[in-house]
Amino acid sequence: MDNYRYLIDFDTDNIRKEYYDVIIIGSGIAGVYTALELPDKYKIAILTKETINISNSVLAQGGIAVSLDKEDSPELHFKDTLYAGAGLCDENSVWVLVNEAAQNIESLCKFGVNFDKKKNRDELSLTREGAHSKNRIIHAGDTTGKEVCDKLISVVETRKNVKIKERTFAIDILTENNVCKGVLTYDEDSEQYVYYVSNVVINAAGGFGQLYSNTTNPEVATGDGVALAYRAGAELMDMEFVQFHPTVLFHSKNKSFLISEAVRGEGALLRNIFGERFMPKYHELNELAPRDIVSRAIFSEMKKTKSDHVYLDITFKDKKYLEERFPNIYKTCLDYGIDISKDYIPVAPAEHYCMGGVKADVFGRTNIIGFFACGEVACSGIHGANRLASNSLLEGLVFGHKIGDEVTRILNENSSADTSFHLKYEKRRTKREFNIEQIKIDIQNLMTKYVGIIRDKECMLIAKGAVDEYYNSVLGILNASIEDFEIQNMVLLAKLVIEAAIEREESRGAHYRVDFENTDDINWKRNIIKSIYK
Ligand code: SIN
Protein backbone atom coordinates (compact mmCIF):
# COMPACT_ATOMS: atom_id res chain seq x y z
CA MET A 1 0.00 0.00 0.00
CA ASP A 2 2.70 2.48 1.03
CA ASN A 3 4.11 2.08 -2.46
CA TYR A 4 1.23 4.18 -3.66
CA ARG A 5 0.66 6.74 -0.93
CA TYR A 6 -1.17 9.03 -3.38
CA LEU A 7 -3.61 8.09 -6.14
CA ILE A 8 -1.94 10.43 -8.64
CA ASP A 9 1.48 11.81 -9.43
CA PHE A 10 1.80 15.55 -8.89
CA ASP A 11 4.06 18.45 -8.17
CA THR A 12 2.47 21.06 -5.90
CA ASP A 13 4.54 23.73 -7.68
CA ASN A 14 2.71 23.03 -10.89
CA ILE A 15 -0.90 22.88 -9.80
CA ARG A 16 -3.39 25.61 -8.96
CA LYS A 17 -3.56 26.39 -5.26
CA GLU A 18 -6.21 27.94 -3.06
CA TYR A 19 -5.58 28.91 0.56
CA TYR A 20 -8.06 28.47 3.44
CA ASP A 21 -8.07 28.37 7.22
CA VAL A 22 -10.26 25.26 7.17
CA ILE A 23 -11.16 22.76 4.47
CA ILE A 24 -14.23 20.58 4.98
CA ILE A 25 -14.69 17.52 2.77
CA GLY A 26 -18.38 16.63 2.40
CA SER A 27 -21.66 18.52 2.41
CA GLY A 28 -23.90 16.33 4.58
CA ILE A 29 -25.09 17.38 8.01
CA ALA A 30 -21.65 16.89 9.62
CA GLY A 31 -19.82 19.04 7.07
CA VAL A 32 -22.28 21.90 6.81
CA TYR A 33 -23.09 22.11 10.54
CA THR A 34 -19.38 22.13 11.42
CA ALA A 35 -18.83 25.01 8.97
CA LEU A 36 -21.58 26.96 10.73
CA GLU A 37 -20.02 26.29 14.12
CA LEU A 38 -16.76 28.02 13.13
CA PRO A 39 -16.24 31.76 13.64
CA ASP A 40 -16.93 33.76 10.46
CA LYS A 41 -13.52 35.43 10.60
CA TYR A 42 -12.04 32.20 9.22
CA LYS A 43 -11.95 31.37 5.53
CA ILE A 44 -13.57 27.99 4.95
CA ALA A 45 -14.07 25.81 1.86
CA ILE A 46 -16.60 22.99 1.68
CA LEU A 47 -15.58 20.49 -0.99
CA THR A 48 -18.30 18.28 -2.36
CA LYS A 49 -18.02 15.66 -5.03
CA GLU A 50 -21.43 16.37 -6.55
CA THR A 51 -23.73 19.28 -5.73
CA ILE A 52 -24.12 20.50 -2.16
CA ASN A 53 -27.57 18.98 -1.73
CA ILE A 54 -26.48 15.41 -2.54
CA SER A 55 -25.52 13.45 0.56
CA ASN A 56 -26.60 10.52 2.67
CA SER A 57 -27.89 12.91 5.36
CA VAL A 58 -30.47 14.37 2.98
CA LEU A 59 -32.03 10.92 2.58
CA ALA A 60 -32.43 10.32 6.32
CA GLN A 61 -36.09 9.85 7.03
CA GLY A 62 -36.81 8.94 10.64
CA GLY A 63 -35.30 11.66 12.75
CA ILE A 64 -32.87 12.59 15.48
CA ALA A 65 -32.69 10.99 18.92
CA VAL A 66 -32.78 13.34 21.90
CA SER A 67 -34.14 12.80 25.40
CA LEU A 68 -36.66 15.64 25.77
CA ASP A 69 -39.61 13.89 27.38
CA LYS A 70 -40.04 14.30 31.14
CA GLU A 71 -40.06 10.49 31.44
CA ASP A 72 -36.75 10.33 29.58
CA SER A 73 -33.15 11.27 30.40
CA PRO A 74 -29.66 11.27 28.85
CA GLU A 75 -28.94 8.29 31.14
CA LEU A 76 -31.67 6.22 29.46
CA HIS A 77 -30.51 7.30 25.99
CA PHE A 78 -26.98 6.27 27.06
CA LYS A 79 -28.22 2.88 28.23
CA ASP A 80 -30.13 2.20 24.99
CA THR A 81 -27.16 3.22 22.84
CA LEU A 82 -24.88 0.87 24.75
CA TYR A 83 -27.39 -1.99 24.54
CA ALA A 84 -27.71 -1.64 20.76
CA GLY A 85 -23.91 -1.32 20.42
CA ALA A 86 -23.46 -4.85 21.84
CA GLY A 87 -20.56 -4.14 24.17
CA LEU A 88 -18.29 -2.16 21.85
CA CYS A 89 -19.37 1.45 22.43
CA ASP A 90 -16.92 3.94 23.83
CA GLU A 91 -18.80 5.04 26.95
CA ASN A 92 -17.08 8.39 27.18
CA SER A 93 -18.10 9.34 23.61
CA VAL A 94 -21.66 8.09 24.10
CA TRP A 95 -21.93 10.14 27.27
CA VAL A 96 -20.94 13.27 25.35
CA LEU A 97 -23.41 12.40 22.59
CA VAL A 98 -26.45 12.01 24.83
CA ASN A 99 -25.64 14.92 27.13
CA GLU A 100 -24.95 17.45 24.38
CA ALA A 101 -27.86 16.39 22.16
CA ALA A 102 -30.46 18.89 23.40
CA GLN A 103 -28.25 21.97 23.09
CA ASN A 104 -27.45 21.13 19.45
CA ILE A 105 -31.12 20.53 18.65
CA GLU A 106 -31.79 23.98 20.07
CA SER A 107 -29.16 25.39 17.67
CA LEU A 108 -30.85 23.60 14.76
CA CYS A 109 -34.18 25.19 15.70
CA LYS A 110 -32.44 28.58 15.79
CA PHE A 111 -31.15 27.93 12.27
CA GLY A 112 -34.82 27.60 11.29
CA VAL A 113 -35.27 23.82 11.15
CA ASN A 114 -38.95 22.96 11.58
CA PHE A 115 -39.52 19.76 13.48
CA ASP A 116 -43.05 18.42 13.90
CA LYS A 117 -44.80 19.66 17.01
CA LYS A 118 -47.33 17.98 19.29
CA LYS A 119 -50.93 18.87 18.38
CA ASN A 120 -51.91 22.33 19.71
CA ARG A 121 -48.66 22.51 21.68
CA ASP A 122 -45.29 24.14 21.22
CA GLU A 123 -43.36 21.02 22.22
CA LEU A 124 -41.62 18.81 19.67
CA SER A 125 -43.42 15.62 18.77
CA LEU A 126 -41.52 12.48 19.80
CA THR A 127 -41.78 9.05 18.23
CA ARG A 128 -40.02 5.76 18.89
CA GLU A 129 -37.66 3.62 16.83
CA GLY A 130 -35.97 0.26 17.34
CA ALA A 131 -34.25 -0.39 20.71
CA HIS A 132 -35.24 2.96 22.23
CA SER A 133 -36.91 2.50 25.61
CA LYS A 134 -38.68 5.88 25.33
CA ASN A 135 -40.22 8.06 22.66
CA ARG A 136 -37.31 10.34 21.81
CA ILE A 137 -37.11 10.72 18.02
CA ILE A 138 -37.82 14.23 16.77
CA HIS A 139 -38.79 14.39 13.13
CA ALA A 140 -39.95 16.50 10.22
CA GLY A 141 -42.56 14.27 8.59
CA ASP A 142 -40.60 11.42 7.02
CA THR A 143 -37.99 13.67 5.40
CA THR A 144 -36.11 14.85 8.47
CA GLY A 145 -32.68 14.79 6.81
CA LYS A 146 -33.91 16.94 3.94
CA GLU A 147 -35.50 19.50 6.24
CA VAL A 148 -32.31 19.77 8.32
CA CYS A 149 -29.92 19.85 5.34
CA ASP A 150 -32.03 22.31 3.32
CA LYS A 151 -32.10 24.76 6.23
CA LEU A 152 -28.42 24.41 7.09
CA ILE A 153 -27.43 24.77 3.45
CA SER A 154 -29.58 27.89 3.06
CA VAL A 155 -27.78 29.43 6.05
CA VAL A 156 -24.28 28.40 4.97
CA GLU A 157 -24.91 29.86 1.52
CA THR A 158 -25.32 33.29 3.11
CA ARG A 159 -21.96 33.05 4.91
CA LYS A 160 -19.41 35.17 3.06
CA ASN A 161 -16.49 33.33 4.66
CA VAL A 162 -17.61 29.93 3.31
CA LYS A 163 -16.90 28.90 -0.28
CA ILE A 164 -18.81 25.90 -1.58
CA LYS A 165 -16.81 23.97 -4.15
CA GLU A 166 -19.11 21.59 -6.00
CA ARG A 167 -18.00 18.81 -8.37
CA THR A 168 -14.69 18.81 -6.50
CA PHE A 169 -13.37 15.35 -5.79
CA ALA A 170 -11.04 14.99 -2.80
CA ILE A 171 -8.34 12.60 -4.00
CA ASP A 172 -5.93 12.61 -1.06
CA ILE A 173 -4.85 14.70 1.88
CA LEU A 174 -1.25 15.84 1.76
CA THR A 175 0.87 15.12 4.81
CA GLU A 176 4.39 15.72 6.01
CA ASN A 177 5.67 14.00 9.17
CA ASN A 178 2.11 13.10 10.12
CA VAL A 179 0.89 16.70 9.84
CA CYS A 180 -1.94 17.50 7.45
CA LYS A 181 -1.10 20.04 4.76
CA GLY A 182 -4.34 20.29 2.80
CA VAL A 183 -6.27 18.40 0.16
CA LEU A 184 -5.43 17.40 -3.37
CA THR A 185 -8.56 17.55 -5.53
CA TYR A 186 -9.85 17.07 -9.03
CA ASP A 187 -12.10 19.85 -10.27
CA GLU A 188 -14.59 18.32 -12.68
CA ASP A 189 -15.60 21.59 -14.32
CA SER A 190 -12.10 22.75 -15.25
CA GLU A 191 -10.77 19.18 -15.48
CA GLN A 192 -7.77 20.24 -13.43
CA TYR A 193 -6.12 19.23 -10.19
CA VAL A 194 -6.37 21.86 -7.47
CA TYR A 195 -4.43 21.86 -4.20
CA TYR A 196 -6.46 23.30 -1.30
CA VAL A 197 -3.84 24.45 1.16
CA SER A 198 -4.78 24.45 4.84
CA ASN A 199 -3.50 23.37 8.25
CA VAL A 200 -6.93 22.07 9.18
CA VAL A 201 -8.90 19.52 7.19
CA ILE A 202 -12.23 18.17 8.45
CA ASN A 203 -13.22 14.93 6.80
CA ALA A 204 -17.01 14.61 6.67
CA ALA A 205 -17.15 12.65 3.42
CA GLY A 206 -19.63 9.93 4.52
CA GLY A 207 -19.56 6.16 4.37
CA PHE A 208 -19.10 3.34 1.87
CA GLY A 209 -22.58 1.91 1.34
CA GLN A 210 -21.86 1.51 -2.38
CA LEU A 211 -19.74 -1.54 -1.55
CA TYR A 212 -23.07 -3.42 -1.48
CA SER A 213 -25.56 -4.15 -4.26
CA ASN A 214 -28.58 -2.82 -2.43
CA THR A 215 -28.07 0.22 -0.27
CA THR A 216 -30.12 3.15 0.93
CA ASN A 217 -27.06 5.35 0.28
CA PRO A 218 -26.67 7.61 -2.75
CA GLU A 219 -24.25 6.83 -5.62
CA VAL A 220 -21.65 9.13 -4.11
CA ALA A 221 -21.16 6.91 -1.03
CA THR A 222 -18.02 5.18 -2.32
CA GLY A 223 -15.99 5.68 0.86
CA ASP A 224 -13.49 8.16 -0.60
CA GLY A 225 -13.04 9.88 2.77
CA VAL A 226 -12.22 6.64 4.59
CA ALA A 227 -9.83 5.49 1.87
CA LEU A 228 -7.90 8.75 1.63
CA ALA A 229 -7.52 8.79 5.41
CA TYR A 230 -6.10 5.26 5.38
CA ARG A 231 -3.59 6.09 2.63
CA ALA A 232 -2.44 9.07 4.71
CA GLY A 233 -1.78 6.83 7.74
CA ALA A 234 -4.97 7.47 9.72
CA GLU A 235 -6.19 4.61 11.87
CA LEU A 236 -9.49 3.00 10.87
CA MET A 237 -11.65 1.23 13.44
CA ASP A 238 -14.58 -1.25 13.42
CA MET A 239 -14.55 -1.73 9.64
CA GLU A 240 -16.28 -5.12 9.97
CA PHE A 241 -19.48 -3.60 11.35
CA VAL A 242 -21.85 -2.70 8.52
CA GLN A 243 -25.48 -2.02 9.35
CA PHE A 244 -28.31 -3.36 7.20
CA HIS A 245 -31.60 -1.51 7.54
CA PRO A 246 -34.36 -4.09 7.97
CA THR A 247 -37.05 -2.44 5.88
CA VAL A 248 -36.07 -1.16 2.45
CA LEU A 249 -38.66 -1.20 -0.32
CA PHE A 250 -38.42 -4.37 -2.40
CA HIS A 251 -39.79 -3.53 -5.82
CA SER A 252 -38.44 -4.47 -9.23
CA LYS A 253 -37.95 -0.77 -10.01
CA ASN A 254 -36.59 0.33 -6.64
CA LYS A 255 -34.60 -1.57 -4.04
CA SER A 256 -33.04 1.39 -2.25
CA PHE A 257 -35.95 3.41 -0.93
CA LEU A 258 -36.05 3.37 2.86
CA ILE A 259 -39.24 2.57 4.71
CA SER A 260 -38.36 4.37 7.90
CA GLU A 261 -38.09 2.56 11.19
CA ALA A 262 -40.50 5.24 12.41
CA VAL A 263 -43.23 3.30 10.53
CA ARG A 264 -42.58 0.41 12.91
CA GLY A 265 -42.34 3.00 15.67
CA GLU A 266 -45.94 3.89 14.85
CA GLY A 267 -46.95 0.24 15.15
CA ALA A 268 -46.28 -1.42 11.76
CA LEU A 269 -45.89 -5.21 11.89
CA LEU A 270 -43.57 -7.47 9.95
CA ARG A 271 -45.18 -10.44 8.20
CA ASN A 272 -43.67 -13.21 6.10
CA ILE A 273 -44.98 -13.91 2.60
CA PHE A 274 -47.73 -16.07 4.12
CA GLY A 275 -48.96 -13.07 6.09
CA GLU A 276 -47.70 -14.48 9.42
CA ARG A 277 -46.22 -12.11 11.97
CA PHE A 278 -42.79 -13.44 13.02
CA MET A 279 -40.86 -10.96 15.19
CA PRO A 280 -42.24 -12.22 18.55
CA LYS A 281 -40.35 -15.48 17.86
CA TYR A 282 -37.07 -13.59 17.62
CA HIS A 283 -36.97 -10.88 20.30
CA GLU A 284 -38.99 -9.53 23.19
CA LEU A 285 -38.99 -6.05 21.62
CA ASN A 286 -40.65 -7.57 18.54
CA GLU A 287 -40.57 -5.19 15.52
CA LEU A 288 -38.64 -2.65 17.60
CA ALA A 289 -35.71 -4.87 18.48
CA PRO A 290 -32.23 -3.53 17.56
CA ARG A 291 -31.70 -3.34 13.81
CA ASP A 292 -29.19 -6.17 13.53
CA ILE A 293 -31.66 -8.54 15.18
CA VAL A 294 -34.60 -7.46 12.99
CA SER A 295 -32.50 -7.71 9.80
CA ARG A 296 -31.34 -11.23 10.69
CA ALA A 297 -34.87 -12.29 11.61
CA ILE A 298 -36.13 -11.08 8.21
CA PHE A 299 -33.24 -12.83 6.48
CA SER A 300 -34.10 -16.04 8.27
CA GLU A 301 -37.84 -15.77 7.42
CA MET A 302 -36.99 -15.11 3.78
CA LYS A 303 -34.85 -18.25 3.77
CA LYS A 304 -37.51 -20.36 5.46
CA THR A 305 -40.24 -19.21 3.09
CA LYS A 306 -37.91 -19.29 0.05
CA SER A 307 -38.72 -15.68 -0.69
CA ASP A 308 -36.68 -12.57 -1.46
CA HIS A 309 -38.78 -10.26 0.70
CA VAL A 310 -41.20 -9.98 3.63
CA TYR A 311 -43.99 -7.47 4.25
CA LEU A 312 -44.51 -4.46 6.45
CA ASP A 313 -48.12 -3.98 7.47
CA ILE A 314 -49.43 -0.55 8.50
CA THR A 315 -52.86 -1.06 6.94
CA PHE A 316 -54.60 -0.66 10.32
CA LYS A 317 -53.85 3.10 10.26
CA ASP A 318 -56.14 5.26 8.19
CA LYS A 319 -55.14 6.86 4.93
CA LYS A 320 -55.34 10.45 6.19
CA TYR A 321 -53.02 9.73 9.12
CA LEU A 322 -50.50 7.96 6.86
CA GLU A 323 -50.56 10.71 4.26
CA GLU A 324 -49.83 13.28 6.96
CA ARG A 325 -47.30 11.38 9.05
CA PHE A 326 -45.39 9.68 6.21
CA PRO A 327 -46.05 11.83 3.12
CA ASN A 328 -42.91 10.80 1.25
CA ILE A 329 -43.27 7.08 1.96
CA TYR A 330 -46.98 7.20 1.18
CA LYS A 331 -46.46 8.93 -2.15
CA THR A 332 -43.40 6.96 -3.24
CA CYS A 333 -45.10 3.62 -2.54
CA LEU A 334 -48.21 4.80 -4.38
CA ASP A 335 -46.04 5.64 -7.40
CA TYR A 336 -45.14 1.93 -7.43
CA GLY A 337 -48.78 0.90 -7.12
CA ILE A 338 -48.68 0.20 -3.36
CA ASP A 339 -51.34 1.96 -1.31
CA ILE A 340 -49.88 1.53 2.17
CA SER A 341 -53.26 2.13 3.82
CA LYS A 342 -54.53 -1.02 2.06
CA ASP A 343 -51.52 -3.02 0.87
CA TYR A 344 -48.66 -4.65 2.71
CA ILE A 345 -45.32 -3.06 1.73
CA PRO A 346 -42.77 -5.54 0.28
CA VAL A 347 -39.45 -4.98 2.07
CA ALA A 348 -36.02 -6.58 2.47
CA PRO A 349 -32.87 -5.55 4.36
CA ALA A 350 -30.30 -3.42 2.52
CA GLU A 351 -27.01 -1.83 3.50
CA HIS A 352 -27.63 1.41 5.35
CA TYR A 353 -24.77 2.62 7.53
CA CYS A 354 -21.08 1.97 8.23
CA MET A 355 -20.32 1.87 11.93
CA GLY A 356 -16.60 1.75 11.17
CA GLY A 357 -14.44 4.50 9.78
CA VAL A 358 -11.67 6.90 10.70
CA LYS A 359 -10.84 6.58 14.39
CA ALA A 360 -11.60 9.89 16.09
CA ASP A 361 -11.97 11.19 19.62
CA VAL A 362 -14.82 13.39 20.87
CA PHE A 363 -13.16 16.44 19.30
CA GLY A 364 -12.96 14.63 15.98
CA ARG A 365 -9.18 14.38 16.27
CA THR A 366 -7.52 11.57 14.36
CA ASN A 367 -3.94 10.35 14.75
CA ILE A 368 -2.87 12.83 12.02
CA ILE A 369 -2.27 16.36 13.29
CA GLY A 370 -4.72 18.86 11.80
CA PHE A 371 -6.92 16.13 10.32
CA PHE A 372 -10.39 15.69 11.85
CA ALA A 373 -13.24 13.29 11.11
CA CYS A 374 -16.95 13.77 11.67
CA GLY A 375 -20.18 11.94 10.79
CA GLU A 376 -20.40 8.56 9.09
CA VAL A 377 -16.79 8.72 7.84
CA ALA A 378 -15.67 8.77 11.48
CA CYS A 379 -15.61 6.06 14.09
CA SER A 380 -15.81 7.77 17.44
CA GLY A 381 -17.03 4.64 19.20
CA ILE A 382 -20.61 5.77 19.75
CA HIS A 383 -22.19 3.05 17.63
CA GLY A 384 -20.16 0.07 18.75
CA ALA A 385 -21.17 -3.04 16.82
CA ASN A 386 -24.63 -1.74 15.87
CA ARG A 387 -25.88 1.83 15.68
CA LEU A 388 -28.98 2.80 17.62
CA ALA A 389 -31.60 4.28 15.28
CA SER A 390 -31.48 8.06 14.79
CA ASN A 391 -28.14 8.51 16.51
CA SER A 392 -26.39 9.30 13.21
CA LEU A 393 -27.65 12.79 12.37
CA LEU A 394 -27.14 13.51 16.05
CA GLU A 395 -23.51 12.38 15.83
CA GLY A 396 -22.86 14.89 13.03
CA LEU A 397 -24.31 17.69 15.15
CA VAL A 398 -22.74 16.95 18.54
CA PHE A 399 -19.27 16.17 17.25
CA GLY A 400 -19.48 18.87 14.56
CA HIS A 401 -20.01 21.36 17.37
CA LYS A 402 -17.09 19.98 19.38
CA ILE A 403 -14.80 20.02 16.34
CA GLY A 404 -15.87 23.64 15.85
CA ASP A 405 -14.65 24.45 19.38
CA GLU A 406 -11.39 22.58 19.00
CA VAL A 407 -10.56 24.01 15.57
CA THR A 408 -11.34 27.53 16.81
CA ARG A 409 -8.90 27.01 19.65
CA ILE A 410 -6.20 25.83 17.22
CA LEU A 411 -6.81 28.64 14.75
CA ASN A 412 -6.74 31.26 17.50
CA GLU A 413 -3.19 30.13 18.15
CA ASN A 414 -2.10 29.95 14.52
CA SER A 415 -4.39 30.39 11.53
CA SER A 416 -1.99 30.77 8.63
CA ALA A 417 -1.65 27.88 6.19
CA ASP A 418 1.86 26.60 5.57
CA THR A 419 2.74 28.26 2.24
CA SER A 420 6.25 26.83 2.23
CA PHE A 421 5.13 23.20 1.91
CA HIS A 422 6.05 21.66 -1.39
CA LEU A 423 5.77 18.10 -2.58
CA LYS A 424 6.58 16.30 -5.78
CA TYR A 425 5.31 12.74 -5.92
CA GLU A 426 6.11 10.41 -8.77
CA LYS A 427 5.65 6.67 -9.19
CA ARG A 428 5.76 4.34 -12.09
CA ARG A 429 2.13 3.86 -13.14
CA THR A 430 0.63 1.79 -15.88
CA LYS A 431 -2.22 2.59 -18.15
CA ARG A 432 -4.67 -0.32 -18.04
CA GLU A 433 -8.06 -0.74 -19.59
CA PHE A 434 -10.79 -1.76 -17.17
CA ASN A 435 -14.49 -2.19 -17.28
CA ILE A 436 -14.90 -0.16 -14.11
CA GLU A 437 -18.66 -0.58 -13.99
CA GLN A 438 -18.22 -4.38 -14.10
CA ILE A 439 -15.61 -4.36 -11.31
CA LYS A 440 -17.97 -2.27 -9.19
CA ILE A 441 -20.84 -4.71 -9.74
CA ASP A 442 -18.55 -7.68 -8.97
CA ILE A 443 -17.39 -6.08 -5.70
CA GLN A 444 -20.98 -5.28 -4.73
CA ASN A 445 -22.11 -8.83 -5.47
CA LEU A 446 -19.20 -10.38 -3.56
CA MET A 447 -19.76 -8.15 -0.52
CA THR A 448 -23.52 -8.74 -0.51
CA LYS A 449 -23.26 -12.49 -0.94
CA TYR A 450 -20.29 -13.24 1.29
CA VAL A 451 -19.76 -10.31 3.67
CA GLY A 452 -23.36 -9.26 4.32
CA ILE A 453 -25.86 -10.02 7.07
CA ILE A 454 -24.63 -13.61 7.58
CA ARG A 455 -20.93 -14.45 7.27
CA ASP A 456 -18.52 -17.34 7.63
CA LYS A 457 -14.83 -17.81 7.03
CA GLU A 458 -15.10 -20.02 3.97
CA CYS A 459 -17.33 -17.54 2.12
CA MET A 460 -15.33 -14.53 3.20
CA LEU A 461 -12.17 -16.18 1.88
CA ILE A 462 -13.83 -16.51 -1.52
CA ALA A 463 -14.59 -12.77 -1.44
CA LYS A 464 -11.07 -12.03 -0.22
CA GLY A 465 -9.46 -13.95 -3.09
CA ALA A 466 -11.44 -12.06 -5.71
CA VAL A 467 -11.06 -8.66 -4.06
CA ASP A 468 -7.30 -9.13 -3.61
CA GLU A 469 -7.00 -9.77 -7.32
CA TYR A 470 -8.90 -6.60 -8.13
CA TYR A 471 -6.81 -4.74 -5.59
CA ASN A 472 -3.56 -5.80 -7.24
CA SER A 473 -4.84 -5.00 -10.69
CA VAL A 474 -6.05 -1.47 -9.89
CA LEU A 475 -3.07 -0.54 -7.73
CA GLY A 476 -0.83 1.99 -9.46
CA ILE A 477 -3.02 2.62 -12.47
CA LEU A 478 -2.58 5.79 -14.43
CA ASN A 479 -5.69 7.66 -13.46
CA ALA A 480 -7.83 9.62 -15.77
CA SER A 481 -11.20 9.99 -14.13
CA ILE A 482 -13.22 10.14 -10.93
CA GLU A 483 -14.43 6.61 -11.65
CA ASP A 484 -10.78 5.47 -11.50
CA PHE A 485 -10.34 7.07 -8.08
CA GLU A 486 -13.61 5.67 -6.79
CA ILE A 487 -12.95 2.11 -7.86
CA GLN A 488 -9.52 2.15 -6.20
CA ASN A 489 -11.11 3.44 -3.00
CA MET A 490 -13.88 0.85 -3.13
CA VAL A 491 -11.52 -2.08 -3.72
CA LEU A 492 -9.30 -0.93 -0.86
CA LEU A 493 -12.24 -0.62 1.52
CA ALA A 494 -13.75 -3.97 0.49
CA LYS A 495 -10.38 -5.54 1.30
CA LEU A 496 -10.25 -3.87 4.73
CA VAL A 497 -13.85 -4.80 5.62
CA ILE A 498 -13.24 -8.43 4.65
CA GLU A 499 -9.95 -8.64 6.54
CA ALA A 500 -11.51 -7.24 9.73
CA ALA A 501 -14.54 -9.51 9.36
CA ILE A 502 -12.36 -12.60 8.97
CA GLU A 503 -10.26 -11.54 11.95
CA ARG A 504 -13.22 -11.14 14.32
CA GLU A 505 -13.97 -14.75 15.22
CA GLU A 506 -17.24 -14.22 17.07
CA SER A 507 -20.72 -12.80 16.47
CA ARG A 508 -21.51 -9.35 17.80
CA GLY A 509 -24.02 -6.73 16.68
CA ALA A 510 -24.08 -6.40 12.91
CA HIS A 511 -21.24 -8.91 12.50
CA TYR A 512 -22.85 -12.35 12.55
CA ARG A 513 -20.80 -15.44 11.79
CA VAL A 514 -22.38 -18.86 11.45
CA ASP A 515 -18.99 -20.43 12.23
CA PHE A 516 -18.69 -18.43 15.51
CA GLU A 517 -22.27 -17.91 16.61
CA ASN A 518 -21.55 -16.67 20.12
CA THR A 519 -20.28 -13.38 21.43
CA ASP A 520 -16.82 -13.87 22.88
CA ASP A 521 -16.15 -11.10 25.39
CA ILE A 522 -12.96 -12.68 26.64
CA ASN A 523 -11.16 -12.44 23.31
CA TRP A 524 -13.15 -9.92 21.29
CA LYS A 525 -14.52 -7.16 23.47
CA ARG A 526 -12.09 -4.90 21.70
CA ASN A 527 -11.88 -2.90 18.52
CA ILE A 528 -9.99 -3.94 15.42
CA ILE A 529 -7.78 -1.12 14.16
CA LYS A 530 -6.52 -1.02 10.58
CA SER A 531 -3.58 1.13 9.62
CA ILE A 532 -0.96 1.09 6.87
CA TYR A 533 1.59 1.03 9.68
CA LYS A 534 0.23 -2.19 11.24
C1 SIN B 1 -34.95 5.36 9.50
O1 SIN B 1 -35.71 6.29 9.31
O2 SIN B 1 -35.35 4.21 9.68
C2 SIN B 1 -33.49 5.61 9.46
C3 SIN B 1 -33.06 6.25 10.69
C4 SIN B 1 -31.65 5.90 10.99
O3 SIN B 1 -30.97 5.29 10.18
O4 SIN B 1 -31.21 6.20 12.10
Image (cartoon, rainbow, N blue to C red):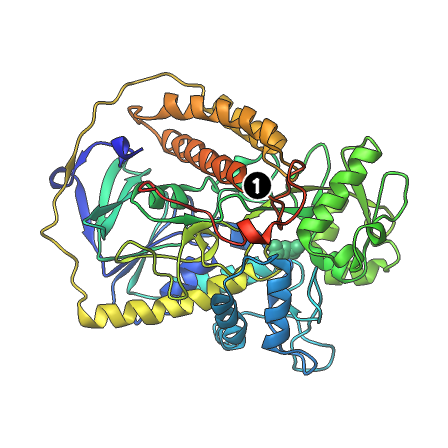
Residue 28: image x %, image y %? 46, 55
**Residue occupying the point 28% across, 24% down:** 478
The answer to whether residue 305 is left or right of residue 391 is right
In the image, what residue occupies the spot 47% across and 59% down?
A: 29
For the point 83% across and 34% down, the residue is 304
Relative to 487, does residue 40 appear above or below in the rendering?
below
Hey, which residue is sitting farthest left in the picture?
A: 420
Q: Is residue 9 left or right of residue 530?
A: left
Residue 330 in the image: above or below residue 77: above
SS at mark 1 in the image? loop
Number of residues whose C-alpha sits closer than 10 Å to that of mark 1, classed few (under 14), some (14–19) or many (20 or more): many
Q: Position of residue 43 (x, y in %)?
A: 25, 63
For the N terminus, give its image quadrant.
top left
Q: Position of residue 328 (x, y in %)?
A: 68, 53
Q: Quadrant of the C terminus?
A: top left
Ligand 1 shown in quarter: bottom right
61, 199: nearer the viewer: 199
Q: Residue furthest top?
A: 433
Q: Position of residue 317 (x, y in %)?
A: 85, 60
The residue at the far front in this view is: 522
Question: In the rendered image, is residue 337 in sight?
Answer: no
Task: Please name whichever residue, 445 or 18, is drawn nearer the observer in this view of the structure.
Answer: 445
Q: Report the amino acid beneath label 1.
A: Glu
User: Which residue in the structure is indicated by mark 1?
Assistant: 505
Residue 497 is at least partly visible in this image: yes
Residue sitting at x 71%, y 71%: 134
Q: Is mark 1 within 8 Å of ligand 1?
A: no
Q: Is residue 281 above or below residue 159?
A: above
Q: In the picture, residue 160 is in which quadrant?
A: bottom left
